[in-house]
Image: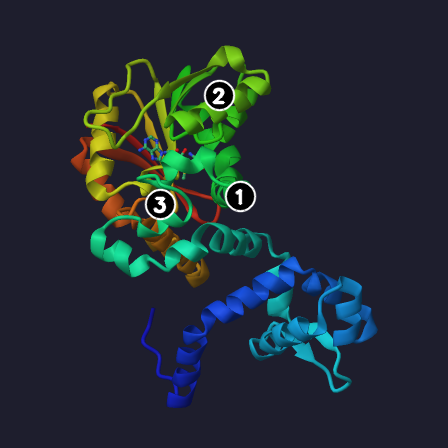
Amino acid sequence: MTKKSIKAIEALEEAQRIALAPFVFQTAVSLRKLGVFSYIFDNRDKDGVSLLEISEAQEIPEYGLGVLLEMAESAGLVIKTDAKKYELTKTGYFLNYDKTVNVNINFTNDVCYKGLFHLKDAVINQKPEGLKELGSWTTIYEGLSQLPPQVQQSWFEFDHHYSDGIFTEALKTVFSKKPTHIYDIGGNTGKFALQCLSSSETISITIYDLPGQLNKALQNVRDAGFGSRIQGKEIDWLAEDPQLEKGADLIWMSQFLDCFSEEEIVKILKACVTVMDENTPLLITETFTDRQKFDNAQYVLEATSLYFTALANGNSKMYTATVFKKLVEKAGLKIEEDLKLGEYHTMLVCKKK
Ligand SMILES: C[S@@+](CC[C@H](N)C(=O)[O-])C[C@H]1O[C@@H](n2cnc3c(N)ncnc32)[C@H](O)[C@@H]1O
């Protein structure tokens, strides 16, 4: 980001916005949940709606609705007309209706909000100190299948939102390698496996994941009728000496390695190298911070890094492609193709050196 000079008064306003950011955030969350943004938008042809009208229609006590709308007006989420009626601003509209904003706001509120309070301690102790707000696990991944339903839903919606969209495009590269048996490392809920199996009549897949997620993924794939072509193996990459079995002619990892520290990534990739021959492609799909066209995308990725710090594991992040390339090399792999997928993703096609 370039250094830009702003007036002291603007800088002070910005500092105040940050000082009070949780108030604005919770105001937006409350107005969404109470259906106020939707009500204002649905009545947009009426030149705005009054506080009383919203209060009666949505059955919200007037006092509380009043303070929410005052904050929302100052924060630029709604405007109040001369006739004291509320209309939605463009920001208010996006907060309520934009898909990505929705996924981010639910993830922030349901998964991260309480845990972020422990961010400083997480940095100092190099542990996800915020995770205790959700459960008593060493990493969030051990607990994914046991999270409270709302937290779990927001976690999976966030995860899926940033992966699912590129699977169709990614499969073209996968199929071009003519694999017969794929290892899906960190298969999560089985979404990639499902899409792959339903697009091919011959490929079989082994998902490697922690027990909780593995069972869910296998169940989902079996329920969809692909039981004969799916297998699962439990693995914990943080264990002493995790190993894969031989047998894959393609290894797939999507949004997986960012769940680990640099040292752990090298350890995982080395374990893959031991079961690869020189023809086995290892496909790594990630959203790299230094490959984003829009500042906004980089902003989301950097916030995601803080989720890893405070809640997920305390030692991973969204990486730059520059760092990743070094890790790949260090593990004994070479990058044969460096492909852009959709707007935000990169796929590295690696082979054994
Ligand atoms: C962010 S999800 C990625 C899911 C999926 N591949 C995608 O593209 O959306 C990371 C996956 O890695 C798995 N994982 C995290 N830590 C792990 C560990 N220590 N051992 C094995 N799997 C792990 C999680 O259970 C989860 O399924």
Q: Amino acid at mark 2?
A: Leu
Q: Relative to 119, is 229 on the left or the right?
A: right
Q: Which residue is mark 1?
A: 157
Which callout, 2 or 3, points to the residue nearer the camera? 3
Helix, strand or loop for disc 1: helix
The Cα–Cα distance between marks 1 and 3, rounded to whole angstroms, is 16 Å
Residue 153 percent location from the top left of the image: 54, 42
First reached walking from the N terminus: tag 2 or tag 3: 2
Callout 1 environment at 10 Å: few (<14), some (14 to 19), or many (20+)? some
- Viewer-side residue, 172 vs 133: 133
The Cα–Cα distance between marks 1 and 2, rounded to whole angstroms, is 19 Å
Please give the name of the residue rendered at 51% of the width and 30% of the height, measured from the top-left corner.
191
- Viewer-side residue, 325 vs 315: 315
Q: Amino acid at mark 1?
A: Glu
Q: How is the structure coloured here?
A: rainbow
Q: Residue 218 got which mark?
A: 2
Q: Is residue 94 in view from this perspective?
A: no
Q: Is residue 182 in view from this perspective?
A: yes
* Quadrant of the rendering where the N terminus is positioned: bottom left
Callout 3 environment at 10 Å: few (<14), some (14 to 19), or many (20+)? many
Residue 30 percent location from the top left of the image: 60, 63
Please give the name of the residue rendered at 58% of the width and 76% of the height, measured from the top-left corner.
71
The picture quadrant for ligand 1 comes to top left
Helix, strand or loop for disc 2: helix
Q: Residue 312 got which mark?
A: 3
Residue 255 percent location from the top left of the image: 39, 39
Q: Relative to 282, is 172 on the left or the right?
A: right
